Amino acid sequence: MWGIIATWRMALEGVQETLPSLAVGGSAGDAIEQAIKAVEDFPYYKSVGYGGLPNRQGQVELDAAYMDGSRLDFGAVCGLQDIANPIGVARRLSQEPVNNVLVAQGARQYALDHGFEAKEMLTDRAQIHYHNRQVELAQEQGLAAYDGHDTVGMVALDGHDHMVAGTSTSGLFMKHPGRVGDSPMIGSGLYVDSQIGGATATGLGEDLMKGVLSYAIVQLMAAGYPPQEACEKAVYDLDRRLRAQRGQAGDLSVVAMNAKGQWGSATNIDNFSFVVASKTTPLTVYRLHPLASGQMELERASQEWLDDYVRQRMRPLEVK
Ligand code: SD4
């Protein structure tokens, strides 16, 4: 069996690129790195890699993580600036005996020392978004600075029963400098064990971390839950708990795949999209709509919706 599942429609092209290789025994690790790099390199996705939105001081700080589900190797970078592909650095760090998680200047120095490409990651377009948001914040009360954040997270299974997970993000728009979310945190943004399965999350990192959500899903799968039920239970339980204790819950969205290539997804927001393909599932983008019961209504995205998603992200921007 082989398969790959990823958060958001933006992962489609990257995932598609990996399928010829995965189908003939290519490695899950290479698939994750290749697919996430494709998202990092696309300048119009404003929450991952090049073109990612900056923090409130106007600097792009990137978080990424890579986990190998067989050796349980884990590497991550937090607050990395001006390096083209954070996922590659996270993967390289996962192979180190120690010093697997590096932040800020130390992460950047490591990347440069190991031959990773230096690149100015703040685009003109991201600067317009930043400028416009500052104008909007000054004009309108109650506007959330944090809207528009889509982390890419993926889990892959290859034909050698090997599973890998990865994440990459610029985090929340207008975040405090140095702020780190769930994406580079083992167990929260991602977790994978080749004997069980893997999961990855997107949404409000501060809340995703409270449930250590990816690890929780893998533990539910270990206890026998199919991926779909594991995702629904983990998201529903955390959402309910947060609402009961704190009066509100941030965005929580997850995808998971088990060691047999079965997959699942859940969310507490409307219209969370994800991409999946496996030996038995043709490449598909789904849109998810949560029902009051905690179960999910799964809708296959139409070609019109897929095209519109990219058109919206590439539309000309006006300076406010
Ligand atoms: C974070 N979880 O930094 C990330 C942001 C994200 O969809 O996933 N947005 O909190």
Image (cartoon, rainbow, N blue to C red):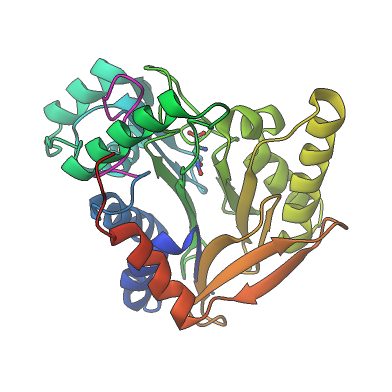
106 lies left or right of 18:
left
Magenta stretch contains residue 49 = yes
Q: Quadrant of the C terminus?
A: top left
Query: Does the rendering let one see residue 31?
Result: yes
Instruction: Please give the name of the residue rendered at 32% of the width and 43% of the height, measured from the top-left corner.
Output: 87
127 lies left or right of 271:
left
- How far from the left and from the top, in percent, is residue 268? 71, 49
Q: Quadrant of the N terminus?
A: bottom right
Query: How many numbered discs?
Result: 0
Look at the picture and state if 314 lies above or below 302: above
- How far from the left and from the top, in percent, is residue 141? 55, 26
Look at the picture and state if 256 lies above or below 51: below
* Residue range (magenta): 48-60
Query: Does the rendering let one see residue 22?
Result: no
- How far from the left and from the top, in percent, is residue 186? 54, 33
Observer-nearest residue: 210 or 96? 210
Name the image quarter holding residue 23. bottom left
Observer-nearest residue: 215 or 314? 314
Instruction: Please give the name of the residue rendered at 34% of the width and 46% of the height, measured from the top-left corner.
Output: 46
Instruction: Please give the name of the residue rendered at 26% of the width and 48% of the height, measured from the top-left corner.
Output: 318
Q: Main secondary structure of the magenta part?
A: loop
Observer-nearest residue: 31 or 58? 58
311 lies left or right of 73:
left
Look at the picture and state if 180 lies above or below 7: above
Instruction: Please give the name of the residue rendered at 52% of the width and 70% of the height, measured from the top-left corner.
Output: 276
152 lies left or right of 200:
left
Look at the picture and state if 223 lies above or below 106: below
Magenta stretch contains residue 221 = no
